[in-house]
Image (spheres, coloured by chain):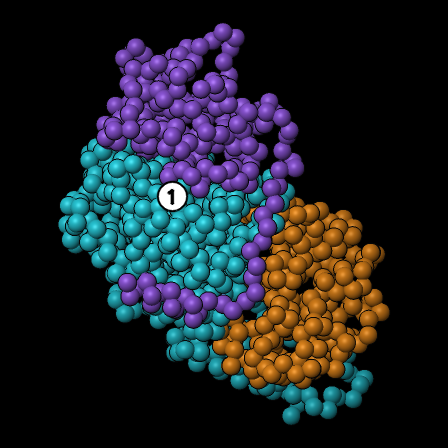
Amino acid sequence: MRIGLFVPCFIDAFYPDVGIATLELLERFHCKVDYPFDQTCCGQPMVNSGCHAEARATEALFVKNFAQYDVIVAPSGSCVHQIRDNLTAVEQTPDVKHVRENTLELVEFLHDVLEVDAFPWARFEHRVGYHDSCNTLRNLGHGKPSELHGEPFSKPRALLEKVAGIELVQIDRPDECCGFGGTFSVTEPEVSAQMGRDKIADHGRNGAEYIVSADSSCLMHQSGCAARIGAPIKFKHIAEILNGASQ
Amino acid sequence: MSGNEPNPAATLQRATPEAQPRPAKAADGKRVDHARSAKQFLNAPEHAKSHDTRVWAMRTKRDKQAHTIEEWEELRELASQIKTHTLAHLDTYLEQFEANAKANGIHVHWAADGAEHNRIVHEIFTEHGVKRVIKAKSMLMEECGFRHYMDSVGIEIVETDLGERIQQLDGEDPSHIVVPPVHKMRSDVARLFAEQLGSDPDNDDAHYLAGAQRDATRPLILDADAGMTGANFAVAETGGFVVCTNEGNADLSANVPNLHVASIGIEKLVPRVEDMGVFIRLLSRSALGSPITQYTSHFRAPKQGGEMHIVLVDNGRSKRLGMEKFWSSLKCIRCGACMNTCPVYRRSGGLSYGATYAGPLGLILNPTFDAHRYSNLPFASTLNGSCTNVCPVKINIHEQIFGWRQVLAENGHLPWTKKTALSAAGKVLASPKGYRVAIKTTNSALKHLPRWALYNRMNAWGEGREMPSPPDNGTFHDWYRRNRLKNQAKTPNEGDSQ
Amino acid sequence: MSARDDILGAVRTNKPAIDAPAPTVPNYDNAYPQGADRLAALFAERLATMGGTWHALADGQSIDAVLQDVLADKVGKPFDDAVIASNVPEVAGNRPLTESDVPASVHDVDIAVLRARFGIAETGSVCFTEAELTVNAVAYLAQHLVVLLDPAEIVANMHRAYQRDDFVNANYTVFHTGPSATADIEGVLVRGAQGVRSLTVIPAPATPA
């Protein structure tokens, strides 16, 4: 199985450690991972604003970079949702269909494909609030959203529970959106920041030292809100913890 | 309305109550600016917190109710199928409904739009010499601007739903389709009732205030010449319609005066009586988290000695039925669950939407009335999808919000600056080389620009958040080149090396 | 009638061309208890959550006595002066209702006593049609409502309720679930918003006509 690693633009620019952790983690499980060097973005910033035509060339470049791989893995739920469900501006060639059908978010890949049952190298002795990003939860099916009736499950929590020393805390509004929302964060800055502050407060109130998520964009937004008000909470991408980060 | 617990934050004694935020309305022909109105709402922190707490409490109660019913998700699916079936055969069911209603002695009228609706009702009132009307809550009549029209022709409309009455007395639109004054605190109501009803301005006890309104409204109810209701459902099989209220005001409107006029949107049809079991089980549980509304009233024919009229209103619905991506919004049963779960609605208040319908439902309905005026609304969402999950008739609300963004962008309704910025972004992101240059510039700009330059007025990100700091050792791309490519031949077509 | 034809024409042209059959609606009553007593117990529990009161008669207790027990301190006047409109043979009342009453004229009623057509255990609802009400408005203009309900006439849930023929035969069919209520002022629950302030259900088998 040849894996193409997609490191979304803002992770590339601001959170290289998340990309590194993802690559190293996959390699720990003996995956053969390539990083196509000409990759940029999945087209989400344009598509999120309704500008599909403006995203066409970016989408085409993405497909060109990744069509050769059996599986494409990315440490970002929102980008995977864009690729899988909304990469429609380009003509739907067999390559495009292949890429859309075979792009997986990291947690899904570890949980559903590799069926990982242990992370022996990982130890994280902290109280952690897990942030279900809306895209991973409701569009990718990481878990049972609180609105739906049914048996509870959570793929990311199932993975984190295999990390030694970790203590997962429960928050009051477990899957309330944090307010990032892509371009929403800048078209509705006040509502967005208020939601971010409320989210951080919920985690803090319930004893979390870290907020952990599979979506760096949510973390970027929340950590920006926390820094502005001086909230002492810390942030980590799930890849970093599963790869053995200790703090 | 029933059920919410008092909000502890709001029971604190306040020396001077915080004034109710009143978002500015967009002028005729202008776009509604949701972001600006939301900011005004958030600038009244007590109101904003109380609003979020109360509306979230409805969502919580909804979950509790839904989760007690084993077949909940099946009921949603049934409701969706019944509505889809009805809409796919709407002409047939409308004709069946009309024929049965007429056979039962009901006068049936048809109105293409709000203006025609108002004209028809006005004619009925004129014929009967009606001077005062008692009215139950109806979102359709809000769509039609009915109350304002009746004001202009000198017919007195008395809202009998407490919440709607509060909004009427305050000259404000409803901010929530089920709880019209949900954005108001008790201090606001105390002040309003003191001015309008002569109640004690220093008594903001909800029981006292509700009692003051009951006492003031009762004589108006007894003396009314006509009653008006909307309808939650219209049953083709019987020619009857169903109205759900918690106060019994539809029943007062229909049963006290001899003349009853019901305004019914053409999408309210269901085929059979047995379908009602599904919808009644879903409606109030979704709306307020109560098992049922206190009153579920089925009107099939005029009462003895009475006269009943139905006005079937289109007002854009038949057009919406033809919109491939959006027709299923006509399945909506107006429960408000999508508003209650919406984190944006809860933080911005219903009046910030500047339209008849607020919240997620409003984002997908309002643009069908006026695409330009409401072109900002589909962007007042994080697309988190919770609305879709709570919807009792399974409308794919968040996908329709997303779909509207595309329609609005393609039809030239996006602000020029936004469109230009995204077009430029699309060009940069389609070019590996351009992208590498842009990333380098961003990072070095972040490193070297002073804070005031980063957070000037143009930088919406910086209004409430810090920017992420650029990583010390460069991008992932840089790291990969240093650590993984050092012993390999360079990728031949590497974008940033050309 | 041009608006009618225009609307129907537009609907005919625009309706989605999809194959969408009407589904069969199950009864979903497997989880409900069997037997009148157990359904009545469920009914009583659900009624209470909606703000109603279930009041079974004690041995030898008359319904008149229940009225006094439950409502004497709520009518705001000496109980003997309370205006009681009764539509049931079990209670005499002092304010007869007739079909020719002007609806608004029943606003003086303190207590209306009615028999429910049937009850719904799922929600604790009682059902009336115009036959039980005589003057429909009395169920809303009265200050308090007392309802006799035959425990044998309690159906399990909404699906069972809507299988009855009342909706096809009666002009007006209404479910009452507790008293009139509102939480429109800051979410505080207030009973007696616009209609009745209280609703009491007394289990009482129907007397043969």
Chain C painted colour: purple
Q: Splitting the image into 4 quarters, where does residue A137 fall?
A: bottom right
Visual hue assigned to chain B: cyan
The correct choice, above or below, for A51 with respect to C80 in the image is below
Left or right, A87 with respect to C75, comes to right
Q: In this rendering, is residue B41 above or below B478?
A: above
Q: Quadrant of residue A96?
A: bottom right
Residue B229 in view: yes
Write the residue at 42% across / 55% down. Answer: B96
Q: Is residue B48 left or right of residue B169?
A: right
The x, y position of residue C10, in whole percent, is: 39, 68
Image quarter (top left, top right, bottom left or bottom right) of the N terminus of chain B? top left
Q: Where in the figure is residue A235, as x and y percent of width and height? A: 62, 57
Query: Where's residue B444, x and y in %?
Result: 55, 77
Q: Say above or below: A184 vs A129.
A: below
Residue A36: image location, x then y, percent = 71, 81
Question: In which quadrant is the C terminus of chain B drawn?
Answer: bottom right
Q: Nearest the camera: B446 or A189?
A: A189
Give the number of marks. 1
Q: Amino acid at mark 1?
A: Arg
Q: Label 1, secondary structure: give it.
A: loop
Q: A30 or C114: nearer the eye?
A: C114
The chain coloured orange in the image: A
Residue at image point 44% right, 27% down: C116
Judging depth in this view, the residue of A233 and A144 nearest the camera is A144
Question: Which residue is disc 1 drawn over?
Answer: B300
